[in-house]
Amino acid sequence: MTKPVKIVFAPGCFDGFKGTQQELDVLLAEIERLFANGTLPEGARKLSESEMEAIASRQIEPRQ
């Protein structure tokens, strides 16, 4: 049996979110659901070091 994935969001990662708190709660629940049923991890890929650095320095916007 595999250990469940713990989803941790970086502080401030939703600061630019334009919706309501209720809409954000729905979005977070959907992300958790997609991870739980395996949909999201199947389509995920590891970012390269340069991609992580570019996102961290805000040179590029994270994919949505």
Image: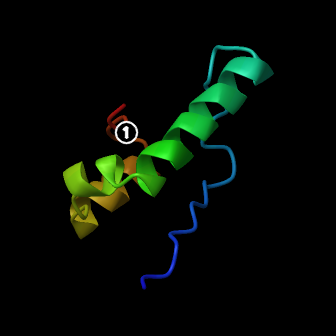
Check the picture and name the quadrant holding the N terminus: bottom left
- The residue to which callout 1 is attached is 62
- Whole-percent x and y of residue 43? 21, 49
Please give left or right for residue 33 compared with residue 14 in the image: left
Q: How many marks?
A: 1
Q: Kindly tell me whether residue 57 is visible in this rendering.
A: no
Q: Quadrant of residue 16?
A: top right
- Whole-percent x and y of residue 41? 31, 57
Q: Quadrant of residue 24?
A: top right
Task: Say above or below: 61 vs 23.
Answer: below
Q: Quadrant of residue 8?
A: bottom right
* Residue drawn at the location 26% of the way across and 68% of the way down: 49
* Residue drawn at the location 42% of the way across and 42% of the way down: 58
- Whole-percent x and y of residue 29? 62, 38
Q: Amino acid at mark 1?
A: Pro
Q: Kindly tell me whether residue 17 is visible in this rendering.
A: yes
Q: Nearer the viewer, residue 5 or 49?
A: 5
Task: Say above or below: 62 vs 32.
Answer: above
Applied colour scheme: rainbow
Please give left or right for residue 57 compared with residue 16 in the image: left
Residue at the extreme bottom of the image, as rendered: 1
Task: Say above or below: 7 vs 4.
Answer: above
Check the picture and name the quadrant holding the C terminus: top left
Q: Nearer the viewer, residue 3 or 63?
A: 3
- Whole-percent x and y of residue 11? 69, 52
Task: Say above or below: 41 vs 29.
Answer: below
